[in-house]
């Protein structure tokens, strides 16, 4: 295989909503380049992209697939990404290591929520975008409507490169307004017939050509001057203008294809090879020190590991981008994230599961290696003397959680190892061992996302697992001051145990004044603060402890033990066993014994006194509340609103955004456990949502009563 230089490499992400036809388009692209001799189909399960068992089982893409195509003397590295929002992490990874996004739109359904979400990601990363209208041969295809919709959503930058002469099952011809030619195909697609534009289409073709020329000229002052002088540009000048427009996102070209019939695919690939930016045309990535690292083949060698998979008959495969320098087999590198050494024994160019061994990869290229000892997804590997480090991929917060455990408890360690490996393959699968909830919490982007992991664990690793509703991390707090005392006394022969603690607790808030005087009934308690401890709690809020003991009622050496007793109850609140927060404690009196008093006695006395006071302080349960934004089509907005209100949501606002309605609400986490599935069901998969932790709020009284009852029943059973 030829060694491609940096100025001959183009990296492209293939994007789009679920069902838009990316996998089918990838087959046609590979066929057109001669990489495969026969195109596979999703239905037959024999495509290059979807080769993992879980993808064949479910019939949709789960992983991004990397393939390359040698076309017109250029190397196109393409990453075919899953379309489902549940697997959005793959698309985000791909866009961070590629330079151009090709977004497929199903001409039958137009711009979907998933399309908008991925377009926003391209905008945030400032990546060029090319649109391809696919399935123009579909029964419901409507080219004109989709173009109008795209202009409403994406703005006037939408610039058709082609338009079809007809759509639906009879689609077989289109006009290319860049080359000003007519392209037509036989029933089996493939190589087109290229002809002059028919007279009846010439006026429309000229109008769109003129718009394209103007869009190209806008991106270069020299071209603009020539356009004003001559009224036209050459084909090469237009390509240069479009390339510059792509880089600054001032032009969004639109192509027409039928991926299934291989119509228009070769022409689009010609555009990718001739017009879209090379690696070196794009802004250089920035390392963690804020320094731009240009893709220089003569620079120091640095690799960014962006993907890890475990593949049948091979084992662990690590995919990387050469950020700088030139990679050859046998080189020794340092993992700057983990401090370990790695030898790159072999390097491959990949085409799905096909790995082609190569001798060299230059800066900007994408490749793979196998059997690394310690490298993980997101790590940077540098040669000696190079200190680059990259950490530019940011993933969305999870939206769906389940507690996970093995059917057989003895398999817990094995499950932990599997989950760690799964996270390496897809960082949007997050695993947390929750000490608070006493559960292993698996978080992801949706029900399908987690269901896919479950299928793989049970079928690939042969480990039966159980998904359960995760417990909610409630918090307990108090709403008024209360006083309590407790004497711990135990005598069983020999030295005994004795400790007595008197304390007052009250709600804590930042900036509250020092304690002075408290009144309970007819009794007044004046505080004289000798010492203060502020303890920030890992789970939020504070415990503030004032030592207000006068004289020698309790020796100062026992105060830390009392604080430990308080923390025992803060870590397991008296109401439901949840963490407590935002409490101030004044220890003002007590008693000790010259022989029997010890640390354990005062720890137990402090714990019990705190529990009693807590129950008398009008305690309340707090629940986590999330800010939720839902993007929905207008025709189902009412149904989505009703569903949210049934989840105790507070609607904060509504707005229109690019043809969709946006609902902003605050929703308790308890009510969001099945929301991903419910929203998909209500809207037919046409909606999406994001959620972000907002705050802890008081639960309604009826909910609190249910929680107290459930906790009491569980403890009585124990």
Image (tube, rainbow, N blue to C red):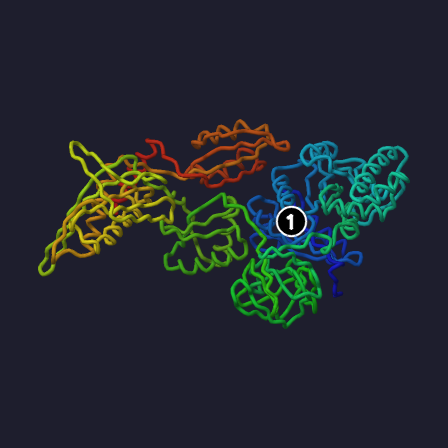
Up/down of 462 relative to 673, above or below:
below
394 lies left or right of 596: right
Residue at 53 percent across and 57 percent down: it is 424
Q: Can residue 716 be seen in this view?
A: no
Residue highlighted by disc 1: 42
Q: Which of 543 and 570 is in front in this view?
A: 543
Q: Which of 16 and 289 is in front in this view?
A: 289
Outermost left residue: 493
Up/down of 542 relative to 36, above or below:
above
Up/down of 164 relative to 466, above or below:
above
Outermost bottom residue: 330
Q: Percent from the top left, x then y, of residue 488?
A: 15, 50
444 lies left or right of 704: right
Question: Which quadrant, please, contains the N terminus?
Answer: bottom right
Residue at 36 percent across and 38 percent down: it is 622
Q: Percent from the top left, x then y, of residue 291?
A: 63, 57
Up/down of 3 relative to 588, above or below:
below
């Amino acid at each position: 295989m030829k060694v491609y230089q940096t100025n001959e490499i183009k990296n492209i992400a293939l994007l789009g909503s679920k069902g838009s036809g990316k996998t089918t388009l990838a087959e046609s692209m590979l066929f057109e380049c001669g990489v495969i001799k026969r195109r596979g189909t999703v239905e037959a399960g024999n495509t290059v992209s979807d080769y993992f068992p879980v993808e064949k089982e479910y019939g949709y893409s789960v992983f991004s697939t990397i393939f390359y195509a040698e076309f017109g003397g250029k190397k196109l590295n393409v990453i075919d990404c899953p379309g489902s929002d549940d697997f959005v992490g793959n698309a985000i990874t791909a866009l961070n290591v590629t330079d151009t996004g090709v977004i497929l739109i199903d001409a039958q359904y137009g711009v979907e929520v998933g399309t908008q979400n991925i377009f926003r990601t391209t905008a945030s990363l400032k990546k060029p975008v090319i649109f391809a209208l696919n399935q123009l041969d579909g029964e419901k295809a409507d080219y004109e409507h989709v173009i109008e919709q795209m202009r409403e959503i994406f703005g006037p930058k939408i610039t058709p490169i082609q338009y079809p002469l007809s759509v639906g099952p009879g689609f077989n011809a289109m006009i290319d307004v860049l080359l000003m030619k007519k392209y037509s195909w036989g029933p089996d697609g493939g190589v087109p017939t290229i002809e002059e534009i028919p007279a009846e289409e010439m006026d429309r073709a000229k109008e769109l050509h003129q718009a394209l020329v103007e869009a190209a000229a806008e991106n270069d002052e020299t071209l603009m001057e020539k356009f004003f002088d001559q009224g036209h540009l050459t084909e090469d000048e237009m390509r240069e203008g479009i390339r510059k427009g792509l880089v600054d996102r001032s032009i969004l070209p639109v192509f027409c294809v039928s991926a299934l019939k291989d119509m228009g695919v070769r022409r689009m690939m010609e555009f990718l090879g001739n017009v879209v930016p090379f690696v070196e045309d794009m802004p250089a990535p920035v390392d963690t020190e804020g320094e731009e690292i240009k893709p220089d083949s003569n620079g120091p060698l640095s690799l960014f590991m962006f993907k890890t998979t475990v593949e049948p008959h091979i084992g662990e495969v690590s995919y990387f981008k050469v950020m700088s320098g030139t990679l050859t087999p046998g080189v020794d590198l340092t993992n700057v994230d983990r401090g370990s050494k790695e030898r790159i024994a072999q390097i491959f160019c990949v085409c799905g599961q096909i790995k082609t061994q190569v001798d060299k990869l230059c800066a900007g290229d994408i490749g793979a290696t196998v059997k690394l000892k310690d490298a993980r997804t997101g790590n940077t590997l540098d040669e000696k003397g190079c200190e680059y480090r990259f950490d530019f991929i940011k993933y969305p917060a999870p939206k769906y959680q389940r507690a996970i455990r093995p059917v057989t408890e003895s398999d817990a360690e094995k499950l932990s190892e599997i989950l760690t490996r799964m996270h390496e393959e897809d960082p949007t699968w997050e695993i947390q061992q929750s000490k608070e909830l006493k559960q292993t919490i698996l978080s992801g982007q949706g029900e399908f996302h987690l269901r896919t992991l479950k299928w793989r664990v049970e079928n690939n690793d042969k480990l039966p697992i159980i998904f359960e509703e995760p417990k909610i991390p409630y918090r307990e707090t108090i709403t008024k001051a209360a006083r309590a005392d407790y004497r711990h006394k135990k005598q069983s022969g020999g030295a005994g145990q004795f400790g007595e603690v008197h304390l007052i607790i009250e709600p804590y808030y930042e900036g509250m004044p020092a304690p002075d005087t408290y009144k309970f009934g007819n009794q007044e308690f004046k505080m004289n603060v000798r010492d203060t401890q502020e303890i920030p709690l890992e789970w939020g809020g504070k415990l503030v402890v004032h030592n207000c003991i006068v004289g020698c009622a309790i020796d100062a050496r026992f105060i830390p033990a009392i604080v430990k007793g308080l923390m025992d109850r803060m870590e397991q609140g008296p109401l439901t066993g949840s963490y407590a927060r935002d409490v101030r404690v004044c220890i003002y009196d007590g008693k000790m014994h010259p022989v029997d008093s010890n640390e354990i006695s005062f720890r137990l006395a402090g714990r019990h006194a705190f529990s009693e006071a807590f129950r008398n302080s009008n305690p309340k349960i707090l629940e986590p509340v999330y800010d939720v934004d839902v993007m929905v089509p207008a025709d189902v907005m009412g149904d989505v609103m009703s569903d949210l209100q049934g989840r105790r949501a507070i609607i904060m606002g509504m707005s229109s955004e690019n043809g969709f309605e946006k609902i902003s609400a605050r929703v308790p986490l308890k009510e969001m456990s099945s929301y991903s599935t419910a929203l998909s069901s209500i809207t037919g998969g046409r909606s999406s949502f994001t959620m972000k932790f907002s705050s802890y709020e008081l639960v309604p009284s009826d909910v609190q009563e249910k929680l107290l009852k459930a906790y009491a029943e569980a403890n009585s059973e124990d």
